[in-house]
Amino acid sequence: MRELLTRILDLFRRDKLDAELKDELSFHEQMLARDARAKGASSGDAEHAARRHLGNITSVRERSRDAWSFAWLEVLQQDVRYALRGLRRAPGFTAAVILTLGLGIGANAAMFGVVDRLMFRPFPLMRDPARVHRVYLQSTARGIVRTKSTFPYTTYRDIARWSNSISDHVAFALHPTIVGSGPTAIEREVAGVSASFFRFFDAKPAAGRFFDASEDSIPRGADVAVLGYGFWKAEFGGRDVIGTKLAVGPLFLTIIGVAPAGFSGVATGAPPAVYMPMTTIAYAWNQSQASTFFLTYNWDWTSMMVRRKDGVSEASATSDLSQAFVRSQLALQSVNRAAGATWGLAPLDSTRPHAIAGPVREAAGPSAGLESQTLLWVTGVAVIVLLIACANVMNLMFARVLRRRREIAVRLALGVSRRRLTAQFLTESMLLALLGSVAGVVIAQWGGAALRVLVLGDGADTGSAADGRTLVVAIAMALISGALIAVGPSLLAARGDVAADLRAGPRAGTFQRSRARSALLIVQGALSVILLVGAGLFVRSLDNVRSMHMGWDPDPVLVAGMNLRGVTLDSASTAALVRRLDEAALSVRGVKSIAHMNADPFSTSTDFLGVAGIDSVARLGRFNQQWATPDYFTTMGTRIVRGRAFTPDDRGGSPLVSVVSESMARKLWPGLEPIGQCMRVGVTARECTTVVGVAEDAVQGTLLDDQHLMYYLPFYQKSPDGGTRNRLVMRMSGADAATHMEEVRRELQKVMPGESYMTVWPLGDEVNTQRRSWRLGATMFVGFGVLALLVAAVGLYGVISYNVGQRMQELGVRIALGAQSSNILGLVIGQGIRFALAGVIAGTAVALTASRWLQPLLFHESARDPAVIGLVGAVMLLVALAASAVPAYRASRADPNSALRSD
Amino acid sequence: MAPAKRDLLPGTLEMMVLKTLTAQPMHGYGIAQHIQRLSKDVLQIEEGSLYPALQRMRQRGMIKAEWGQTPNNQRARYYTITPTGRKQLGEQQSGFAELVAAIGLVMKTS
């Protein structure tokens, strides 16, 4: 260590050391001469002998100098200078390589920036993140394992109480909530957290203090708030707000502190505006559950984070949390039995509950959605793009070395060791790769911001792509690709036949087919085929999901939901408010019809169903329930295929009726007339609910549900006063409902009492959110696929035209011997096509093998779709044709005269 | 007739330089002379190996170098042994003694 330091210091004072050594040696010389004189030699002889004795002073100095410099550093410097000179002499080659590598590295740096932010990067300021986990709960129902990352607060308390492997735990939840009052009030991310939350971070409040356990206690926490730093700066200009009041949802809180800058808790998107106690926020989010949220198990809203005790492994934490979860499930069953509830009572042998101590970032955990899986695939795609880029550059390097064969031979003949030569190629490659990574970071910076918005959403930490972690990755990629692209030329340089090359010179008689270069071309082609097949599959998935018949029309429909913000209404005034809202909605120009429903299309609600002759309806699948007013079907655009829709007469007190989906009718009464059938809805139901109509199948819950088991109940039979927790849906006359959104909201808001407010959104937005993963896959695969194809095409062009250049003489001889230009064209183009064909075959084989894993990410599309594979094959062949056409044309014009003359 | 020169065993030069410097600080020429004298002219230290060795030893912290005056008022670089150097010397010396003893044993038996 100390030696290294001295050596580095010596490196900087090497001129001084050199001068000192020179003095020292001359002193030595003088002394030798003096001693020789003393022994009686003549002064001239003595000096001469002394100098001879001392030998070659230069050699001594050089060998000493080795000690105070790093020899390799100087050699490296030399090599870098040599490489730079070489690159400056070939600007076209250099630019092509830097651009190609830049695209490859840039694509990866951009993807890494996104994936890292979504899945891997530790949360800012978190203390010892390696021991912190999010708790995931899994259970099995109908053979399907379901993973939950949110669960009842009661479950959180059970697990915290009954586990021994954790040293700390926290409950938290994040939800958009209205903040502020008056016209400036808007929905912001609000975090409910246990008091222990702040202990997970090395964070000191920027002002005031955080709340403590006494302020986060059941049954109800204190009305206190800690502001997010960004919100504090933006909304209050960073002034002293401690002790002032802030409205959050229906609550009025006292601001007690401000979180420090850079603190965002465990939010992936926008950092929360407000942090407040879990036991307080329950009252803001779910007033009907508020008084029992810590006793019952029917509100899944709590996420849980734990810190492992020292020396406890992840696996033992998982099994310890699991036993706690099992106890909690038993507690749930006894609570439910006591309350007469009928759900959650399945024996634990069949549900097999267990917990997992997993990554804090959900996207990296067991409950990650389609989107993060798609993202991982896209990352793989980016790596493939880099591989193609490297293959391409390797090819260019090969061509360059072949062109410089003579120069290399001369240098070898002059005594340059092959090792030095290899080192020089490596230097050149590394230099190119590093320049490429600089270009890559620029490209990532430029394209990455758009990508991060596409994936992470607005308001997320979309900062610069050039942060430390991304830079490290970019440099690592540069080093790897630099090593990769140096392999070929180095091998070639190390093996070349000096004598033959010297004799033949640059104009080697016959062209040599390089097996390595052909292999590279085929690999490139194959990789491009894989990407393009992926692109095709995702595009068709997106197409399928877009053209999918939903059973309702997303485009002309607006949805509205209300938030009462603490305004309490009795049944009569609720009914009056609903009536006034209906009138206000219908008064807006363009609103054709309105209806109420109780569940958003992408949420589900269900209930116990009993049907005569069927043991357990639940075993047949999940039956979703929707409460609908009479105009629901016309407003949503869901067709009634048999019987009738609801009428205003289907209200409280009238006979219970239902409309069922076609699939449900087929499932429950196969081959029978569904109209007039009887079902019992709810465990305690005695009365028949009679089926009066059959509706077309409609999407509910998720786009991926192919079962479409769904039934509708008359809204006013379930909720006579209309209720305030339902959705108002409005069908507009135009196809683009979004343009009317603000106007509708204004009209509805006029009716709302007090601080309560209305939110309006297009139904299409909900659908788009659901389609995101396929849109992401299609966009990214197509983008990268086209990039790969271009790079591969350029590579093919380069190789073919190089080959043609090498063969000019042979081709000239052929023409002189009577070959037609069509023969020559066929010869060259045939070569290009053969490469492409080999690539298509290899790529298809890989794509078919990988199809098994890609299948779950696609939508109603076979991962082995022959149409996609065929199309991609055709495109590849066409591109190969185009890429070899130009060199082929040049070849067909080979001049027989010059060919014959030059030999 | 000068005695035949012997090649040095690798690593022994450092050891002898260190040993020489334990007596007093010395310049390069002095070190070479000292070794030659004590070895009765058997060991003649080539400057080509002495000065690079001195540089290496300085970098490893075994010796220090300072410019000083010779008794004849000439400028010369004097080398001093450091505590690290003394420790090194002890280790090398005992290692060398073991080696010589071992070689001696082998040579005696045959």
Image (tube, coloured by chain):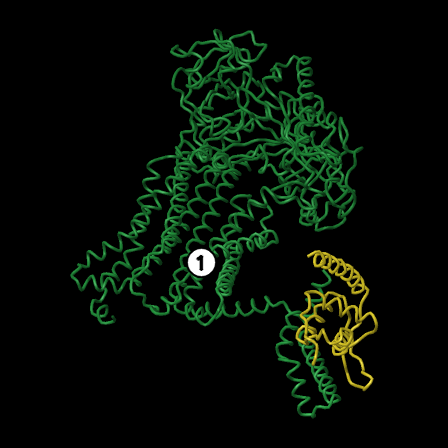
Chain colours: A green, B yellow
Which quarter of the rendering shows the C terminus of chain A?
A: bottom left
Q: In this view, does A408 lie above or below A122?
A: below
Q: Residue at 41% x, 55% y: name it.
A: A392
Taking the view exactly as shown, the residue that stands out farthest to the left is A818
Tag 1 subunit: A
Q: Name the quadrant containing residue A123.
A: top right
Picture coordinates of residue A726, whole percent (x, y): 56, 26
- Looking at numbered disc 1 in the image, what kind of residue is underneath it? Leu
Q: Can residue A653 be seen in this view?
A: yes
Horizontal side of A815 relative to A568 (left or right) equals: left
- From this view, report whether residue B71 is shown above or below residue B56: below
Could you say where residue A321 lies in the image, as x and y percent from the top left? 68, 27
Q: Quadrant of residue A176?
A: top right
Q: In which quarter of the image is residue B76?
A: bottom right
Q: Which residue is drawn at 70% across and 84% down?
A: A29
Q: Mark 1 points at which residue?
A: A491
The number of callouts visible is 1
What secondary structure is found at the residue carrying circle 1?
A: helix
Q: Nearer the viewer, residue A419 or A167?
A: A419
Query: Which is more toward the observer, A355 or A657?
Result: A355
Residue A13 in the image: x percent, y percent?
Answer: 69, 73
Which of A373 and B66 lies nearest the eye of the viewer? B66
Relative side of A680 to A178, left or right: left
Q: Nearer the viewer, residue A494 or A772?
A: A494
Q: Where is residue A61 in the image (x, y as percent from the top left)?
A: 64, 76
Q: How crowded is mark 1: few (under 14 residues within 10 Å), some or many (20 or more)?
A: few
Q: Which residue is drawn at 68% across and 85% down?
A: A50
**In screen coordinates, is A426 left or right of A529?**
right
Q: Quadrant of the N terminus of chain A?
A: bottom right
Determine if residue A654 is in view: no
